[in-house]
Amino acid sequence: MKTSTDFAKYLSRFLSEYLPHHRDLSPNTIKSYTTTFIQFISYMRDEKKVTVERLTLEWLNRDNITGFLLWVKDNRKCSNATRNYRLAAISSFARYLQYEDVGRLSNWQQILNIKALKTEKRNINYLTVDAIKLLFSQPNTTTIKGRRDLALLALMYDTGARVQEMADLTPDCVRIENRPYTIRLTGKGRKSRIVPLMGEQVELLHGYMQEHHLDIPQKKMHPLFFNNRREKLTRSGITFILHMYVTMARTDNPEIIPGTVSCHSLRHSKAMHLLQTGVNLIYIRDILGHRSIQTTDIYARADSKQKREALEKAYVDVIPESKGEYQWEKDKNLLDWLQSLR
């Protein structure tokens, strides 16, 4: 795409220089920001009849941005959360332009004043321990593909990893030669964390790596999980694998498999299972790679079983035992009044 507009010039610098070098954002975040501006360009072309060759910073104003955000919700049927994420990308660009194009500072500030919409608090979608066991019994471990899929799903659950963190794994991230067994996950903002591995998981992972010769120095930077072309599995590829086995598990026992199961459901499941076995929220936060304990606290608020048990333990019986006769039955005046209501 060849164009010489100021919009193209500043947007190119924003995506290729400012975000990766000054903000140090990850490639995945930059890709998501890029998607926002591709959609904005499409909106301006289809709804405002302004082609990309004619699209200048003059068109980047509050009215067009609010129109675009409404289009994202109504035409693309996106949620408030997605709409807010598109707004966040545009707001970041507006903050950048405050210093690059000072002459239109008022315009950029008007864009920055656009408010995010309230988002609904969704229930945490997680699987029970029995559902996880059923899911992991589905891969056919007599085949190479089945053994790979089981190693992939078990590792994703055991570490509470995000799907992109799984896709980015290499053998160099794995430390299973000596105890303590660990794996290095790189999450949002390219921040790395070390997550411990259990013995059963190590046995499964070690067998998989030996089978594919991933335990030799020459394969240290090779994708840990890959397809038939030996290319690393993508987010959609991992999601496809999970959905295939979820469908199989639901056929076996539809009662314990939720209607919607995503890769993030395995992450939620691990967090809830750790919480239910008494693991401190601080440790769960560190395993999941949350920035704040407040983010991890959603699992404590969602765990109704733990709430009920805590209330039962704390309950003090202050009500005297019934002698077979209710208090109002002893009060003749009250009883007569109740009967008169008939």
Image (cartoon, grey):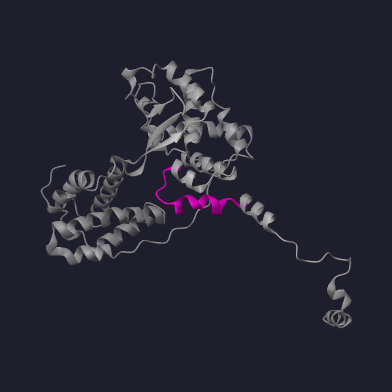
Which quarter of the rendering shows the C terminus? Answer: bottom right
Indicate the position of residue 36 as horizontal and vertical percent values: 29, 49
Q: Residue furthest front?
A: 179
Q: At x 39% / y 19%, what residue is drawn? A: 215
As drawn, 32 above or below 107: above
Identify the image quadrant of residue 340: bottom right
Residue 261 in sight from this viewpoint:
no
Q: Residue furthest left?
A: 4
Report the label total: 0
- Viewer-closest of 13 and 317: 317
Q: Main secondary structure of the magenta part?
A: helix
Indicate the position of residue 22 as horizontal and vertical percent values: 20, 47
Indicate the position of residue 51 as horizontal and vertical percent values: 19, 51
- Any magenta on residue 247? no
Q: At x 14% / y 56%, what residue is drawn? A: 100
Magenta highlight range: 288-304
Q: At x 42% / y 47%, what residue is drawn? A: 290
Q: At x 25% / y 55%, what residue is drawn? A: 92
Which quarter of the rendering shows the N terminus? Answer: top left
Residue 151 in sight from this viewpoint:
yes
- Viewer-closest of 69 and 265: 265
Indicate the position of residue 243 as horizontal and vertical percent values: 50, 34
